[in-house]
Image (cartoon, rainbow, N blue to C red):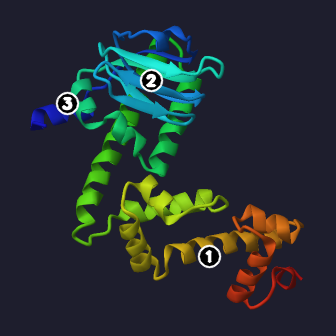
Amino acid sequence: MKAETEQDFWTIQPDVSGFRVHNYENIWGQQQHVNRYDELLYVLDGKCTLELENGMTFPAGSGDFLLVPRMIPHRDIFEPLRGLKIMMVVFSWKNAEAFFSKVTNVELHRLDFATRSEVRRRLEFMYGQWSRDEISHKNANIQLHALLMLIYQSIIQAEDSAEKEFTGVVHPKLIQQAKFFLTENYASEITLEQMARKLGISPSYLSRLFQKEFGVSFSAYLTTVRLENAVSLLRHTSLQIAEIAYRCGFKDSSYFIKTFRQHYGKTPGNFRS
């Protein structure tokens, strides 16, 4: 990207022409159609597959994002009985072509957890403020530009991280994202492979990252996060031990009690007492 073009990229805002929550009709999946404007889609409910004229397909489910450039023939395929509910931002932008050359639907699917969460939060905030008066319109242009730049920057940084993976350099943002992801999802069943996929890096690199930054393995760090939250529940609630184990991501209470004793030298019941 040339210097003058890159300057425009970061300063010239898109123009939002529409912002709505839309329940799709099956006709959009039955025949190809084109849009006069660029679209950013946020799937609120249902599953769909964006099929382009060249045969490329991009599946998306609730919580996912899709980009549809203007004048590109496509179909939005979904199950009519289940329906499809989309939050749609319709816009035009001088720099759309340069943006779409870097930010594709493949890259959107690979966005890290923290960025995806922030994009959803911003879209929902924008939708709550949207109206067609002049001030709201200008505000929407500013917010959409910031959101698109957030996505762009995240993808560029992910590419840098992938390159640095081979040189042994740890990108600080990866550490932040890893900690954020575990803090938000410790109660779920999380594997090293799943988390690596969310961050867009290899499992082996993620394993080395945890060992280097925290001095423990991924599983040991996750266990520590779960136990710290268990301690908080033991101190501040009257929940049963089995319920605390479940809420903190342990498969069964006996394993939780054993692990807790190994770390704190006493059972959860004795700790609470």
Quote the CA–CA distance across marks 2 and 1: 42 Å
Q: Which residue is mark 1?
A: 224
Mark 3 element type:
helix
Position of residue 269 relative to residue 34, above or below, is: below
Mark 2 element type:
helix
Pointer 2 or 1: first along the chain: 2
Pointer 2 or 3: first along the chain: 3
Please tell me how crowded label 1 is: few (under 14), some (14-19), or many (20+) other residues with Cα within 10 Å. Answer: some
72 lies left or right of 23: left
**Of discs 3 and 1, which sits in the foreground?**
1
Q: How many marks?
A: 3
146 lies left or right of 27: left
> Closest to the observer: 49 or 24?
49
Q: Which three-letter amino acid code belongs to the residue tagged 1? A: Thr
Q: Which residue is mark 3?
A: 8
Q: Residue at x 53, y 15 (%)?
A: 131
The answer to whether one can see residue 135 in this image is: no
Residue 133: x %, y % from top left: 49, 11
Mark 1 element type:
helix
> On the image, which quarter does residue 39 sit in?
top left
Q: Residue at x 45, y 12 (%)?
A: 134
The reply to whether dot 2 and dot 3 touch (C-beta < 8 Å) is: no
The reply to whether dot 3 and dot 1 touch (C-beta < 8 Å) is: no
Q: Which mark is residue 140?
A: 2
Residue 52: x %, y % from top left: 34, 21
68 lies left or right of 244: left
Please tell me how crowded label 3 is: few (under 14), some (14-19), or many (20+) other residues with Cα within 10 Å. Answer: few
Quote the CA–CA distance across marks 2 and 3: 19 Å
Quarter of the figure that contains the C terminus: bottom right
Q: Which three-letter amino acid code belongs to the residue tagged 2? A: Ala
Residue 164: x %, y % from top left: 24, 64
> On the image, which quarter does residue 138 sit in?
top left
